[in-house]
Amino acid sequence: MLQRFASDLSRQDFLACGVELASVLGMDRDAAGERIDAWPDDVERFVASIDNPVLLTDAWRLAELAPRLRDTVFKLLESPVRTTEFRGVRLTFEQARWPGVWGPNIDTLLCCRALGDHGVDGVESAVELGSGSGFISKFLLTHAPKLRAMTLVDRHAGAAACSRANVPDARAEVICGDATTALAGRRFDLVVTNPPYIPRPRSIADNAYEGVDLLAFLTQQGADMLTPGGRIVTITSSLSAHLFEPMVAKSSLRARTLSTTDVPLKVLNVLNNAEWLDYLRKARGVRCEVRDGYELWHEIRVVALEACATL
Ligand SMILES: C[S@@+](CC[C@H](N)C(=O)[O-])C[C@H]1O[C@@H](n2cnc3c(N)ncnc32)[C@H](O)[C@@H]1O
């Protein structure tokens, strides 16, 4: 299954490819009438699209498609392998092969869109903290014309291995380690991250979405990782704004919002945990609003953090 996004993220197309063409789209005979079990992987057929996606798998929006298209897309979503394409960058991710690794998500694409729209032309060295599947780094390697060295760091061993497999580029260096300690003394033109941002009392470090430790590190020590004129680009959320904003105010950095997008809160581990959800509701970062198939929303911001003197 291939999901392809418009350059401004105004549209998400679902395409069938490879074996799905025969098994789902019925393309199971060649011109001579001979049976075809699987087409080459690069043969694709458009199936359906949705406008202005706010999730990568939006069951509500997909359920509104005409029945045949709805069922076809849901069938394609059962595929263990999913390819995501945005602005010419393609990454194939198989969750079963990389258990516990965070595949490309709406935040990932929002981060890439902001990087592309706000200029990476002068960037020669970059690091991605918490690289997961490696999509953002792959995007930078494709879109930053002067990029000579791209460092990817993830403390999850599987994520580091996944990044290594997905970014086979001589300019890329993958480090398995904690970004708060693994890069001591190194400086970069660009530090980019889509970090965990869902706060939780006594948060556990091994969830890709839980806690704000990396955001705290960035505000406290991020300036020391930057070359003169360098900047940090990070994803944040209204869920942790009450923690993040005071941290920025105390830092030597100033925040500039590059984009904001309302998205549903769809982390089931949070939604099904009454205590955690109650904590998020009290912190006010989650908006209770029944619309478009979801009842809890938060705002994702892509933020540039720059040394005060740079502004
Ligand atoms: C939300 S996922 C983002 C993955 C990927 N960058 C993306 O946008 O698709 C956050 C990633 O950060 C990693 N991570 C969290 N804290 C970290 C730390 N202190 N050092 C290194 N990696 C960290 C997690 O293992 C996870 O892979």
Image (cartoon, grey):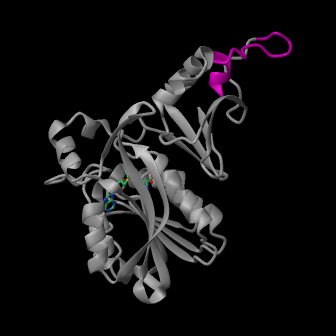
Q: Name the quarter where the N terminus is drawn.
A: top right
Q: Residue 97: give x, y in percent of width and height.
A: 43, 38
Marker count (numbered): 0
Q: Residue 195: give x, y in percent of width and height.
A: 36, 58
Q: As displayed, is residue 148 above or below residue 23?
A: below
Indicate the quadrant where residue 37 lies: top right
Q: Can residue 106 be seen in this snapshot? A: yes
Residue 31 lies within the magenta run: yes
Q: Which residues are magenta?
A: 16-34
Q: Can residue 181 be seen in this snapshot? A: no
Q: Residue 65: give x, y in percent of width and height.
A: 58, 23
Q: Residue at x 73, y 32 (%)?
A: 43
Q: Residue at x 55, y 17 (%)?
A: 71
Q: Residue at x 51, y 54 (%)?
A: 110
Residue at the top extreme, as displayed:
33
Indicate the quadrant where residue 22 lies: top right
Q: In the image, is 199 to the left or to the right of 12?
A: left
Quarter of image, ligand 1: bottom left
Q: In the image, is 55 to the left or to the right of 22?
A: left
Q: Residue 302: give x, y in percent of width and height.
A: 46, 62
Q: In the image, is 114 to the left or to the right of 142?
A: left
The prevailing secondary structure element of the residues shown in magenta is loop
Residue at the right extreme, as displayed:
32
Q: As displayed, is residue 124 above or below residue 82?
A: below
Residue 14 lies within the magenta run: no
Indicate the quadrant where residue 15 lies: top right
Q: In the image, is 123 to the left or to the right of 202?
A: right
Q: As displayed, is residue 184 above or below residue 59?
A: below
